Image (spheres, rainbow, N blue to C red):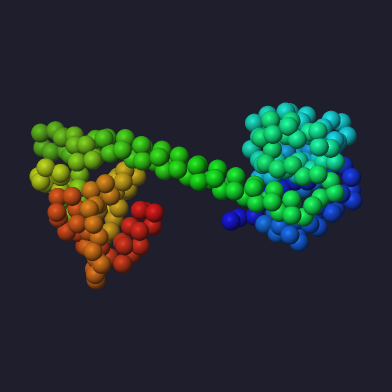
Amino acid sequence: MEQIKAIIVEDEIPARETLVHYLKKYCPIVDVVDTASDANEAIEKLRKQPVDLVFLDVELPFGNAFDVLDKIGAIPFETIFITAYEQYAIDALNHNVAHYILKPIDIEELIKGVNKVKLHINNRKNQLRKEENSNKERNYRAIQSRKFVFPHVNGFDLIEIGNIVSCKADNNYTEFILLDGSKKIISKTLKTIQQQLQDYGFLRVHKKYLVNLEHIVSYQKGNPGQLTMVNQSGIAVTSSGKALLLNTLK
Protein backbone atom coordinates (compact mmCIF):
# COMPACT_ATOMS: atom_id res chain seq x y z
CA MET A 1 0.00 0.00 0.00
CA GLU A 2 1.14 3.56 -0.71
CA GLN A 3 2.11 5.92 2.07
CA ILE A 4 -0.79 7.47 3.98
CA LYS A 5 -0.30 11.24 3.88
CA ALA A 6 -1.30 12.83 7.16
CA ILE A 7 -1.63 16.16 8.96
CA ILE A 8 -1.46 16.45 12.74
CA VAL A 9 -3.65 19.13 14.29
CA GLU A 10 -2.47 19.61 17.88
CA ASP A 11 -1.82 22.83 19.82
CA GLU A 12 0.46 21.26 22.45
CA ILE A 13 3.99 20.96 21.08
CA PRO A 14 5.09 18.02 23.30
CA ALA A 15 1.96 16.05 22.35
CA ARG A 16 2.55 16.81 18.67
CA GLU A 17 6.18 15.73 18.81
CA THR A 18 5.29 12.54 20.69
CA LEU A 19 2.72 11.59 18.06
CA VAL A 20 5.20 12.23 15.23
CA HIS A 21 7.74 10.01 17.03
CA TYR A 22 5.23 7.20 17.61
CA LEU A 23 4.08 7.25 13.99
CA LYS A 24 7.63 7.05 12.66
CA LYS A 25 8.45 4.15 14.95
CA TYR A 26 5.21 2.12 15.02
CA CYS A 27 3.26 3.21 11.95
CA PRO A 28 5.84 3.92 9.21
CA ILE A 29 3.17 3.78 6.54
CA VAL A 30 1.98 7.18 7.78
CA ASP A 31 3.83 10.13 6.25
CA VAL A 32 3.26 13.29 8.29
CA VAL A 33 3.35 16.02 5.64
CA ASP A 34 2.30 18.96 7.84
CA THR A 35 1.04 20.09 11.25
CA ALA A 36 -1.33 22.76 12.52
CA SER A 37 -1.69 24.27 15.98
CA ASP A 38 -5.18 25.80 15.89
CA ALA A 39 -8.55 25.43 14.18
CA ASN A 40 -8.06 28.25 11.67
CA GLU A 41 -4.65 27.00 10.58
CA ALA A 42 -6.02 23.46 10.23
CA ILE A 43 -8.90 24.61 8.02
CA GLU A 44 -6.57 26.65 5.82
CA LYS A 45 -4.08 23.82 5.36
CA LEU A 46 -6.68 21.12 4.80
CA ARG A 47 -8.33 23.20 2.08
CA LYS A 48 -4.99 23.64 0.28
CA GLN A 49 -3.31 20.27 0.75
CA PRO A 50 -4.98 16.94 -0.03
CA VAL A 51 -4.25 14.28 2.59
CA ASP A 52 -5.51 10.81 3.46
CA LEU A 53 -5.62 11.16 7.24
CA VAL A 54 -5.94 13.87 9.89
CA PHE A 55 -4.97 13.37 13.53
CA LEU A 56 -7.24 15.89 15.18
CA ASP A 57 -7.15 17.17 18.74
CA VAL A 58 -10.67 18.04 19.87
CA GLU A 59 -9.95 21.15 21.95
CA LEU A 60 -8.10 23.75 19.88
CA PRO A 61 -7.49 27.49 19.93
CA PHE A 62 -10.10 29.41 17.85
CA GLY A 63 -12.52 26.48 17.80
CA ASN A 64 -12.58 22.72 18.11
CA ALA A 65 -12.35 19.61 15.96
CA PHE A 66 -16.04 19.72 15.03
CA ASP A 67 -15.68 23.30 13.77
CA VAL A 68 -12.82 22.14 11.56
CA LEU A 69 -14.78 19.24 10.11
CA ASP A 70 -17.95 21.28 9.62
CA LYS A 71 -16.13 24.09 7.80
CA ILE A 72 -14.23 21.71 5.53
CA GLY A 73 -17.60 20.38 4.33
CA ALA A 74 -17.23 17.26 2.19
CA ILE A 75 -14.43 15.44 3.99
CA PRO A 76 -12.03 13.68 1.59
CA PHE A 77 -9.89 12.19 4.36
CA GLU A 78 -10.02 9.83 7.33
CA THR A 79 -9.97 11.31 10.83
CA ILE A 80 -8.55 10.04 14.11
CA PHE A 81 -9.51 12.07 17.18
CA ILE A 82 -6.91 12.46 19.88
CA THR A 83 -8.24 14.02 23.09
CA ALA A 84 -8.16 13.95 26.87
CA TYR A 85 -11.96 14.04 27.04
CA GLU A 86 -14.18 10.95 26.75
CA GLN A 87 -17.42 12.90 26.35
CA TYR A 88 -16.74 13.62 22.67
CA ALA A 89 -16.90 9.99 21.62
CA ILE A 90 -20.55 10.04 20.44
CA ASP A 91 -20.04 13.27 18.49
CA ALA A 92 -16.97 11.69 16.91
CA LEU A 93 -19.06 8.75 15.72
CA ASN A 94 -21.63 11.12 14.26
CA HIS A 95 -18.86 12.75 12.22
CA ASN A 96 -17.70 9.34 10.87
CA VAL A 97 -14.40 9.54 12.69
CA ALA A 98 -12.32 6.42 12.05
CA HIS A 99 -10.94 6.10 15.58
CA TYR A 100 -10.88 7.84 18.95
CA ILE A 101 -7.72 7.86 21.09
CA LEU A 102 -7.52 9.20 24.63
CA LYS A 103 -4.45 11.04 25.90
CA PRO A 104 -1.88 10.02 26.89
CA ILE A 105 -1.62 8.10 23.63
CA ASP A 106 -1.60 4.33 23.93
CA ILE A 107 0.61 2.83 21.23
CA GLU A 108 -1.66 -0.16 20.67
CA GLU A 109 -4.64 2.16 20.18
CA LEU A 110 -2.62 4.24 17.73
CA ILE A 111 -1.70 1.17 15.69
CA LYS A 112 -5.32 0.00 15.84
CA GLY A 113 -6.51 3.36 14.56
CA VAL A 114 -4.04 3.46 11.69
CA ASN A 115 -5.03 -0.09 10.69
CA LYS A 116 -8.68 0.99 10.61
CA VAL A 117 -7.75 3.87 8.35
CA LYS A 118 -5.79 1.54 6.04
CA LEU A 119 -8.85 -0.71 5.77
CA HIS A 120 -11.17 2.22 5.03
CA ILE A 121 -8.83 3.60 2.36
CA ASN A 122 -8.45 0.18 0.71
CA ASN A 123 -12.22 -0.36 0.72
CA ARG A 124 -12.80 3.05 -0.79
CA LYS A 125 -10.19 2.48 -3.50
CA ASN A 126 -11.68 -0.92 -4.33
CA GLN A 127 -15.13 0.62 -4.61
CA LEU A 128 -13.83 3.39 -6.87
CA ARG A 129 -12.05 0.79 -9.01
CA LYS A 130 -15.28 -1.19 -9.38
CA GLU A 131 -17.18 1.94 -10.35
CA GLU A 132 -14.50 2.93 -12.87
CA ASN A 133 -14.53 -0.55 -14.42
CA SER A 134 -18.32 -0.46 -14.58
CA ASN A 135 -18.24 2.95 -16.27
CA LYS A 136 -15.58 1.75 -18.71
CA GLU A 137 -17.70 -1.25 -19.62
CA ARG A 138 -20.78 0.92 -20.15
CA ASN A 139 -18.78 3.36 -22.28
CA TYR A 140 -17.22 0.48 -24.22
CA ARG A 141 -20.64 -0.97 -25.03
CA ALA A 142 -21.85 2.44 -26.13
CA ILE A 143 -18.98 3.14 -28.50
CA GLN A 144 -19.32 -0.28 -30.12
CA SER A 145 -22.73 0.85 -31.40
CA ARG A 146 -21.24 3.78 -33.30
CA LYS A 147 -21.00 3.62 -37.07
CA PHE A 148 -18.00 3.13 -39.35
CA VAL A 149 -18.15 4.57 -42.84
CA PHE A 150 -17.35 2.30 -45.81
CA PRO A 151 -17.16 4.44 -48.99
CA HIS A 152 -17.86 2.92 -52.39
CA VAL A 153 -18.39 4.18 -55.93
CA ASN A 154 -22.09 4.84 -55.40
CA GLY A 155 -21.81 6.42 -51.94
CA PHE A 156 -21.08 4.75 -48.62
CA ASP A 157 -22.34 2.12 -46.17
CA LEU A 158 -22.62 2.57 -42.40
CA ILE A 159 -21.76 -0.46 -40.26
CA GLU A 160 -21.88 -0.63 -36.48
CA ILE A 161 -18.36 -0.90 -35.09
CA GLY A 162 -19.53 -3.82 -32.95
CA ASN A 163 -20.17 -5.81 -36.12
CA ILE A 164 -16.50 -5.70 -37.10
CA VAL A 165 -14.67 -8.84 -35.90
CA SER A 166 -11.21 -8.07 -37.27
CA CYS A 167 -9.27 -6.18 -39.92
CA LYS A 168 -6.51 -7.59 -42.11
CA ALA A 169 -3.80 -5.69 -43.96
CA ASP A 170 -3.65 -6.19 -47.73
CA ASN A 171 -0.90 -3.86 -48.99
CA ASN A 172 -2.56 -0.40 -49.21
CA TYR A 173 -5.98 -1.90 -48.58
CA THR A 174 -7.65 -3.28 -45.47
CA GLU A 175 -10.07 -6.19 -45.39
CA PHE A 176 -12.84 -6.06 -42.77
CA ILE A 177 -14.36 -9.31 -41.52
CA LEU A 178 -17.89 -8.81 -40.17
CA LEU A 179 -20.00 -10.81 -37.72
CA ASP A 180 -22.34 -12.09 -40.44
CA GLY A 181 -19.37 -13.61 -42.29
CA SER A 182 -19.27 -10.97 -45.01
CA LYS A 183 -16.17 -8.95 -45.89
CA LYS A 184 -15.56 -5.40 -46.96
CA ILE A 185 -12.40 -3.90 -48.46
CA ILE A 186 -11.42 -0.30 -48.05
CA SER A 187 -8.57 1.57 -49.75
CA LYS A 188 -6.80 2.57 -46.53
CA THR A 189 -3.78 1.02 -44.84
CA LEU A 190 -4.23 -0.98 -41.65
CA LYS A 191 -2.22 1.67 -39.81
CA THR A 192 -4.80 4.29 -40.78
CA ILE A 193 -7.66 2.01 -39.73
CA GLN A 194 -5.88 1.33 -36.45
CA GLN A 195 -5.73 5.06 -35.72
CA GLN A 196 -9.46 5.32 -36.41
CA LEU A 197 -10.51 2.33 -34.29
CA GLN A 198 -8.00 2.06 -31.44
CA ASP A 199 -10.23 4.12 -29.14
CA TYR A 200 -13.20 1.88 -29.90
CA GLY A 201 -12.00 -1.41 -28.43
CA PHE A 202 -9.63 -2.52 -31.20
CA LEU A 203 -6.05 -3.71 -30.74
CA ARG A 204 -3.18 -4.33 -33.19
CA VAL A 205 -1.93 -7.82 -32.27
CA HIS A 206 0.10 -8.45 -35.44
CA LYS A 207 1.49 -6.34 -38.27
CA LYS A 208 -1.30 -7.77 -40.42
CA TYR A 209 -4.18 -7.91 -37.92
CA LEU A 210 -6.35 -5.55 -35.92
CA VAL A 211 -8.96 -7.23 -33.69
CA ASN A 212 -12.11 -6.21 -31.88
CA LEU A 213 -11.50 -7.14 -28.21
CA GLU A 214 -15.22 -7.72 -27.80
CA HIS A 215 -15.07 -10.68 -30.17
CA ILE A 216 -12.08 -12.60 -28.78
CA VAL A 217 -13.03 -16.07 -27.58
CA SER A 218 -9.66 -17.54 -26.55
CA TYR A 219 -5.88 -17.26 -26.80
CA GLN A 220 -3.53 -20.14 -27.58
CA LYS A 221 0.17 -19.92 -26.71
CA GLY A 222 2.68 -20.47 -29.48
CA ASN A 223 5.19 -18.77 -31.72
CA PRO A 224 3.27 -16.90 -32.86
CA GLY A 225 0.32 -17.22 -30.49
CA GLN A 226 -3.17 -17.37 -31.86
CA LEU A 227 -6.52 -15.80 -31.02
CA THR A 228 -9.77 -17.54 -31.76
CA MET A 229 -12.46 -15.04 -32.65
CA VAL A 230 -16.22 -15.34 -32.22
CA ASN A 231 -16.55 -16.36 -35.90
CA GLN A 232 -14.00 -19.16 -35.26
CA SER A 233 -11.33 -17.44 -37.35
CA GLY A 234 -7.74 -17.67 -36.13
CA ILE A 235 -5.62 -14.53 -35.73
CA ALA A 236 -1.84 -14.67 -35.31
CA VAL A 237 -0.43 -12.76 -32.31
CA THR A 238 3.17 -11.58 -32.06
CA SER A 239 5.02 -11.43 -28.71
CA SER A 240 4.60 -7.65 -28.59
CA GLY A 241 0.94 -8.06 -29.53
CA LYS A 242 0.51 -10.53 -26.68
CA ALA A 243 2.03 -8.07 -24.21
CA LEU A 244 -0.36 -5.35 -25.40
CA LEU A 245 -3.28 -7.74 -25.21
CA LEU A 246 -2.54 -8.87 -21.66
CA ASN A 247 -1.98 -5.31 -20.48
CA THR A 248 -5.23 -4.15 -22.07
CA LEU A 249 -7.31 -7.03 -20.69
CA LYS A 250 -6.11 -6.28 -17.16
- Left or right of 222? Residue 116 is right
Task: Give the quadrant of the N terminus.
Answer: bottom right
Visible residue check, residue 207: no
Q: Quick check: 172 above or below 100?
A: below
Question: Residue 60 versus residue 202: which sits nearer the camera?
Answer: 60
Q: At 10% across and 37% down in the image, what residue appears? A: 153
Q: Tell me: residue 24, above or below residue 213.
A: below
Residue 45 percent location from the top left of the image: 76, 39
The residue depicted at 84 percent of the width and 43 percent of the height is: 10
Can you give x and y, in whole percent of width and height, for residue 233 in the image?
14, 55
Q: Position of residue 25 (x, y in %)?
A: 76, 61
Instruction: Determine if residue 59 is in view.
Output: yes
Q: Specify the quadrant of the image occupied by residue 73.
A: top right
Count the labels in the image.
0
Depth check: 8 or 189 in front?
8
Residue located 18% across and 39% down the image: 150
On the rendered image, what quadrant is the C terminus found in?
bottom left
